[in-house]
């Protein structure tokens, strides 16, 4: 058992080292060649167009990163949502478009204020709109966010992050009221709700690419390249391992 644990730890450390090397190489590549070609993500293109329409109309944009928190198992999804929020806040600062964001946990609330601070530094003025802390309970959060969207007459609803069944409540409400809706999450149990309630969606790991697509930040682009290359490397290793095992070169 100890030997197995030691082996798994060594493999984990080796993979982490390989990823860091790939990340470093990707950062050098982005610095030397600029932004790499990225396949189109329809949801992010729709987000840009929706923001343009909100800017023209002067109506608010609502952003929800879900009911996850920072520092727990759904940290990655919450950070992906915060990256999208940062982009929307920055556009709101540039073009004086109201941005409404709603939260269910204190840790994401604090991160949202930091995103607004950075947007203010980039755009020169604080973006109009409000940041709401609603409730940690999923059903209470969904009810509160629905009221915010209706009372503030939001034109666009963006929901990207960690969601449970509350996604369906918010998604159905925006669909019923004819509000433009962009959604995305990683939970397989929630993905059918995303697909059913929105024509523009990010499925699974696509939400982690949003920061690189929207910001063109060299670090985010390098991370995206490194992740793709790491996945390719793992797929190759799995195939090679299966072939060697079928040939009897390695044991079971």
Image: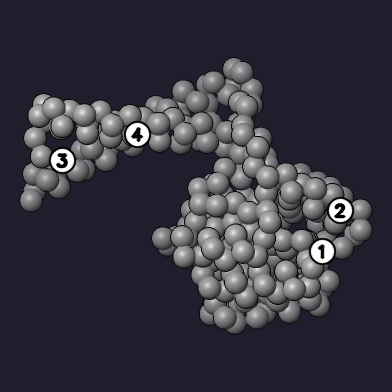
Which residue bears the numbered disc 2?
53
Please report contact status of discs 1 and 2: CB closer than 8 Å, yes or no.
yes
- If you read the primary sequence from the N terminus, does the residue marked by circle 1 or circle 4 appear first? 1
Label 4, residues with CA under 10 Å away: few <14, some 14-19, many ≥20 = few
Q: Residue at x 54, y 77 (%)?
A: 138
- If you read the primary sequence from the N terminus, does the residue marked by circle 1 or circle 2 appear first? 2
- If you read the primary sequence from the N terminus, does the residue marked by circle 3 or circle 2 appear first? 3
- If you read the primary sequence from the N terminus, does the residue marked by circle 4 or circle 2 appear first? 2
The answer for how far apart the CA atoms under marks 3 and 4 are is: 20 Å
| Residue 148 at x, y percent in the picture | 74, 75
Picture quarter with the C terminus: top left
| Residue 196 at x, y percent in the picture | 61, 64
Secondary structure beneath dot 4 equals helix
Which residue bears the numbered disc 4?
235
Please give left or right for residue 6 compared with residue 219 in the image.
left
Label 3, residues with CA under 10 Å away: few <14, some 14-19, many ≥20 = few
| Marker disc for residue 7 | 3
Residue 245 in which image quadrant = top left
Please give left or right for residue 159 compared with residue 13 in the image.
right
Question: Is residue 242 in view from this perspective?
Answer: yes
Q: Residue at x 57, y 74 (%)?
A: 166
Total marks shown come to 4
Q: Nearer the viewer, mark 4 or mark 2?
A: 4
Q: Residue at x 50, y 48 (%)?
A: 205
Q: Nearer the viewer, mark 1 or mark 4?
A: 4
Which residue bears the numbered disc 1?
155
- If you read the primary sequence from the N terminus, does the residue marked by circle 1 or circle 3 appear first? 3
Secondary structure beneath dot 2 equals helix
């Amino acid at each position: 058992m100890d030997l197995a644990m030691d082996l798994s730890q060594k493999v984990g450390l080796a993979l982490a080292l390989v990823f860091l090397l790939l990340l470093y190489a990707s950062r050098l590549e982005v610095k030397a060649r600029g932004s790499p070609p990225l396949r189109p993500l329809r949801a992010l293109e729709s987000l840009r167009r929706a923001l343009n329409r909100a800017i023209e109309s002067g109506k608010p944009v609502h952003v929800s990163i879900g009911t996850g928190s920072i520092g727990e198992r759904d940290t990655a999804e919450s950070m992906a949502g915060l990256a999208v929020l940062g982009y929307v806040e920055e556009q709101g600062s540039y073009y004086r478009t109201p941005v409404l964001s709603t939260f269910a946990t204190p840790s994401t609330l604090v991160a949202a204020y930091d995103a607004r601070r950075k947007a203010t530094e980039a755009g020169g003025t604080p973006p109009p709109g409000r940041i709401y802390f609603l409730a940690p309970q999923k059903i209470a959060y969904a009810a509160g966010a629905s009221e915010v969207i209706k009372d503030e007459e939001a034109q666009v609803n963006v929901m990207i992050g960690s969601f449970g069944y509350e996604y369906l409540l918010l998604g159905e409400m925006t669909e019923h009221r004819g509000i433009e809706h962009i959604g995305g999450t990683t939970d397989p149990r929630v993905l059918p709700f995303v697909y059913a309630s929105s024509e523009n969606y990010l499925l699974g790991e696509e939400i982690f690419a949003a920061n690189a697509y929207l910001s063109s930040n060299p670090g985010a682009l390098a991370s995206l390249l490194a992740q793709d290359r790491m996945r390719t490397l793992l797929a190759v290793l799995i195939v090679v391992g299966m072939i060697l095992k079928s040939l009897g070169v390695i044991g079971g």
